[in-house]
Image: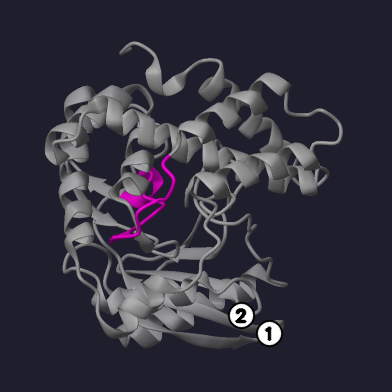
Amino acid sequence: MSTHGPVTTDGPLVTGGPLTARAPMADPGRAHAAARAIAAAALGRDPGPMATAESGSHHVYVGPEVVVKIIDAASHARLNREIALAPHLPAGLTAPLLESGTHRLESGDVRYACYARVPGTAPGMGMPGVDGATARAWAEEAVERLGRLHAWVPEGDADRTLRETLDHGGFTGRAAFSAEVEALAAHDRHGTVPPRLLDGLRAIARDAPAHARTAVPVHADCHWDNWLAQGRSVTALLDFEWARFGDPVDDWFFLIRFSGPHMETVLDVIARATQTSPDTLRAGCEVREATHLAADLRVALEDPDGHARMAADRLRSLEELIVGRYWWRPAR
């Protein structure tokens, strides 16, 4: 949905945060050299070969023992948020932070975070090629790990960081959601969003809770690209840049919606683990998807030339949500 804010990439559907493309660096070769220098300083030795990994908002380099994330210092500050939280998160939840700070390039300063590499690979959006038993096992472990996050009581700097204002593009309450839908309609000067889809968003908004709970720490971007798994176990949850106080369903939505053909399996795992009725989960997830899509589409329509692909992707998702009744279709 919104790249959890509005979206971070022009990829399928959501993923957390206001729309932010990866900040370009003048010389990728220098950025790669910087990552090697950062990794060498953290390890106290040569880090070995480091490959470039795909990322929608950072430059990421992966070595045998470390992962380095780099972003231009003048770009968004969400990496600072992740760095501030890393030492305080529940043990074993994410990759250990080894070093962080700023590094000078000829093109300007960059911010970086250097993490210990955790075994495993990302299941990926839609869990491609994953069998049902493995999907259920991953979902069970992911729910357990998120349960630890939701039970965490942050103090001091961690508490303050999670309470900082964050334009995450997610659901905060009925009035704000309705206002987002009307803002989308106002920006849609060329009729890009069909009236039936706008009416569908309005109907979901009318039935949404008056206020969203902000009772527990949530990751708020825990789709399956942000997990690592090995065999039938998950090994880490990554990328805490959108973490904040919220409602557990803010996380359940991402697990369920991006499980592809295993959507019903993951929903069942969460319903059983949290003793929540499946219909209650469906309703909460529908509201969150609708809110993210409305925010993403508004951002895309504000800059139609720059975000044409994202607008098309979100329109397809909105059609599936409203006309296809994604959250209420019979089990597939």
Vertical side of 198 occupied by 94: above or below: below
Task: Judge from the rendering whether residue 62 lies leftward or rightward of residue 90; answer left or right.
Answer: right
Above or below, 294 against 247 in this view is above
Looking at this view, is 236 or 166 the one in front?
Answer: 166
Please, what secondary structure does the residue beneath circle 2 have? loop
- Which residue is found at the position 63% from the left and 58% from the top? 20
Foreground of the two, 303 or 176: 176
Measuring 86% from the left and 31% from the top, which residue is drawn there?
190
For the residues bearing labels 1 and 2, Cβ distance under 8 angstroms: yes
- Which secondary structure class fits the magenta region best? loop
User: In which quadrant of the rendered image does the C terminus lie?
Assistant: top left
Q: Which mark is residue 327?
A: none
Which of discs 1 and 2 lies nearer the camera? The answer is: 2
Residue extending furthest toward the right: 190
Q: Secondary structure at mark 1?
A: strand
Relative to 174, say whether 190 is above or below.
Answer: above
Q: How is the image coloured?
A: one colour
Residue closer to the observer: 104 or 259: 259
Q: For mark 2, what is the residue?
A: 73
Kind of residue at badge 2: Ala
Binning the other alpha carbons within 10 Å of mark 1 as few (below 14), some (14 to 19) or many (20 upward) gives few
Q: Position of residue 147 (x, y in %)?
A: 18, 53
Q: Is residue 10 visible?
A: no
**Res 68 visible:** yes
| Magenta stretch in the rendered image | 209-227
Q: Is residue 222 a member of the stretch shown in magenta?
A: yes
Q: Which residue is mark 1?
A: 108
Look at label 1 and name its amino acid. Gly
Identify the residue at horizontal 20%, vertical 70% (top origin).
Answer: 153
Instruction: Please tell me whether residue 215 belongs to the stretch shown in magenta.
Output: yes
